[in-house]
Amino acid sequence: MRDEIIDEVHAIKESLAEEFGFDVRRIFEDIKRSEVQTELEGWHHIQPAEVLAESAFRRTRFAHH
């Protein structure tokens, strides 16, 4: 079963990647430029939460079996 929304997201992702020559660094640089521009326009970006090295999730997720 195909999901139209997922198909649309994939098409947008492919289009954006093609726009930057499939170069991850160029995509990242464009994102950072966009963040600077929106901050200059008065928008605020939420910073990622601090990584908790000893959280239960990390101990479970990255446990070596």
Image (cartoon, rainbow, N blue to C red):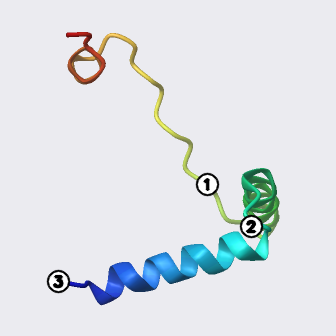
* Front-lying residue, 28 or 10: 10
Tag 3: residue type? Met
Residues marked 3 and 2 touching at CB (< 8 Å): no
Mark nearest the camera among 3 and 2 is 3
Tell me if residue 34 comes above or below residue 24 in the rendering: below
Q: Circle 1: is it few (<14), some (14-19), or many (20+) Cα within 10 Å?
A: few
Q: Amino acid at mark 1?
A: His
Write down the residue under mark 3: 1
Question: Farthest residue in the bottom direction?
Answer: 4
Question: Marks 1 and 2: CB-CB under 8 Å?
Answer: yes
Q: Of circles 3 and 1, which is in front?
A: 3
Quarter of the picture holding the N terminus: bottom left
Q: Please report the residue visible at 34 percent of the width from the left and 84 percent of the height from the top.
A: 5
Check disc 2 and report the residue beneath it.
38
| Label 1 – label 2 distance at C-alpha | 9 Å
Picture quarter containing residue 61? top left
Q: Secondary structure at mark 3?
A: loop
Occupied quadrant, residue 40 = bottom right
